[in-house]
Image: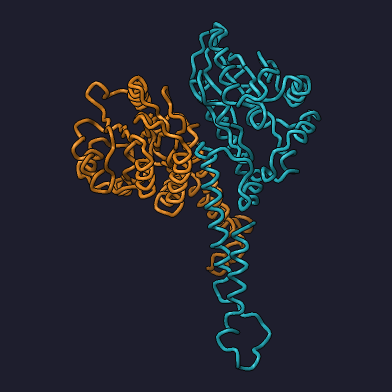
Chain colours: A orange, B cyan
């Protein structure tokens, strides 16, 4: 239930009828609803309050303070939509890439080909915004069957700021490992999608094999990072939109959390 | 330099005088400055843009995406002050405590006295806001001598939502370990300050001993957590306003990042 809207509605309702209750016996007054002067302010206050609460919720998402969640709060549906479709999201994405670039350039590479940057795929390199626009930007419970249909199209656009970082990291001499929760069955379409929108020359694309299905992303990705470290790779950078891309063991020297208030993967 | 204000000033300046330049030979016009209709909008756009940029910066702080920084961006000075002194900061603090409380209640304790919740002190249990209010809310470079004088007063107020969580965690049966970057020399004043504002019955208060001085907070706190684990304690919760309170080895099962856009401790 949209609590704030309901509250606002109730407030206006009670304001509009309060005079009638005070003097029920006088003659009918002109049929003009006399809004109190500050009704506009009340609207604004209510909007501001919702903005405040949803921004606070978004912070809690991005700092990994929330317990696992399945959908965004209903009262923040408009807020998340506005965020994802406005400059705010793009500015946040660009800042992450910029900071990651500054760090990447500051690293002295060993030159032995063992310096690695790990990238997640969905909402990190590729954007599923066209899909989520059709599914309430996280308001609907995740539907794997529907989402897989979207993935099979192979038309997810690149996140431009991530492509820029990707190319820079590649040019600097990092090995690039793509580590995604997508299934091994989606390898071909994923490769085609990535190449079509400009990503190329990665060193490994790691997808969930049959034995990885059902594992928490944190576990699956940790195991894969452990494997890299055992093979002698040094994970110097890691970009992902989920904390499950970044936390666990064999963590990267620096991790970069891309914004994503639409869904949570444990 | 406050770049946005300067830019705005220049824009208005050029708007105000642009007519004069176009027709320099006609008779003097009435001495009323004719602002274009959208000047208010321009003010608003510029304010909105700054709000957007500083919110994005704050996200980058709270998600640990930034390289080590010494002061807040000058153009975000008003933004950070507004945030710290408004309901926004309090709402964010309350949300963190609420989420931590939900988690704490969901944990099944072993009953062997080995289940631990770690709390940082500054900006986690105690607020140094009165000090930072006098020092530009992070706009001034940190001055250890001045800050120590403030600490010696022992008058830092409690963060109310943290006190509530603290009492709940204690009641649930967790052992409470306080792990602070403050010096062992400040033990007495820290204990007095904590007790005076309502914190009590912790199991350990760990401060930096002489051999810990000069260590990065991440290293110092990791070493102390490693020590706890070696002693058989299970770190189930950890609350801190810095990522250096939370990351490293022997990390807690769940970590709770309190907001703090005023300073960064590596």
Q: Nearer the viewer, residue B177 or B10?
A: B10
Which residue is found at the position 34% from the left and 36% from the top? A120
Quarter holding the N terminus of chain A is top left
Which residue is found at the position 41% from the left and 31% from the top? A110
Q: Nearer the viewer, residue A82 or B255?
A: B255
Can residue A47 be seen here?
no
Can residue B155 be seen here?
yes
Query: In the figure, residue A231 lies in which quadrant?
Result: top left
Which residue is found at the position 50% from the left and 31% from the top? A65
Q: Position of residue B11 (x, y in %)?
A: 58, 70
Q: Position of residue B234 (x, y in %)?
A: 52, 13
Q: Position of residue B41 (x, y in %)?
A: 55, 67
Task: Judge left or right: residue B244 versus residue B188.
Answer: left
Query: In the figure, residue B239 lies in which quadrant?
Result: top right
Q: Nearer the viewer, residue A159 or B98?
A: A159
Vertical comparison of B211 with A26: above or below: above
Vertical comparison of B222 with B44: above or below: above
Q: Position of residue A96 (x, y in %)?
A: 45, 43
């Amino acid at each position: 239930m949209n609590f704030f809207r309901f509250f606002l509605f109730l407030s206006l309702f009670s304001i509009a009828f309060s005079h009638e209750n005070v003097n029920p016996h006088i003659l009918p007054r002109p049929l003009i609803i006399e809004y109190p002067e500050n009704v506009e302010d009340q609207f604004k206050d209510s909007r501001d309050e919702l903005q405040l609460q949803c921004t606070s919720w978004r912070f809690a998402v991005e700092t990994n303070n929330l317990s696992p969640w399945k959908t965004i709060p209903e009262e923040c549906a408009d807020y998340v939509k506005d965020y994802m479709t406005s400059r705010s999201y793009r500015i946040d994405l660009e800042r992450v890439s910029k900071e990651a670039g500054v760090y990447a350039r500051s690293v002295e590479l060993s030159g032995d080909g063992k310096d690695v940057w790990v990238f997640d795929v969905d909402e990190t390199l590729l954007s599923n915004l066209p899909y989520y626009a059709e599914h309430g930007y996280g308001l609907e419970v995740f539907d794997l069957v529907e989402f897989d249909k979207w993935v099979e199209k192979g038309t997810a656009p690149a996140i431009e700021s991530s492509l820029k970082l990707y190319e820079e990291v590649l040019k600097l001499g990092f090995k690039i490992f793509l580590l995604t929760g997508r299934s091994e069955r989606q390898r071909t379409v994923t490769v085609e999608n990535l190449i079509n929108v400009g990503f190329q020359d990665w060193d490994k694309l790691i997808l969930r094999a049959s034995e990885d299905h059902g594992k928490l992303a944190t576990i699956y990705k940790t195991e894969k990072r452990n494997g890299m470290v055992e093979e002698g790779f040094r994970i110097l950078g890691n970009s992902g939109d989920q904390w499950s891309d970044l936390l666990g063991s064999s963590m990267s020297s620096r991790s970069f959390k891309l914004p994503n208030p639409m869904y949570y993967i444990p």
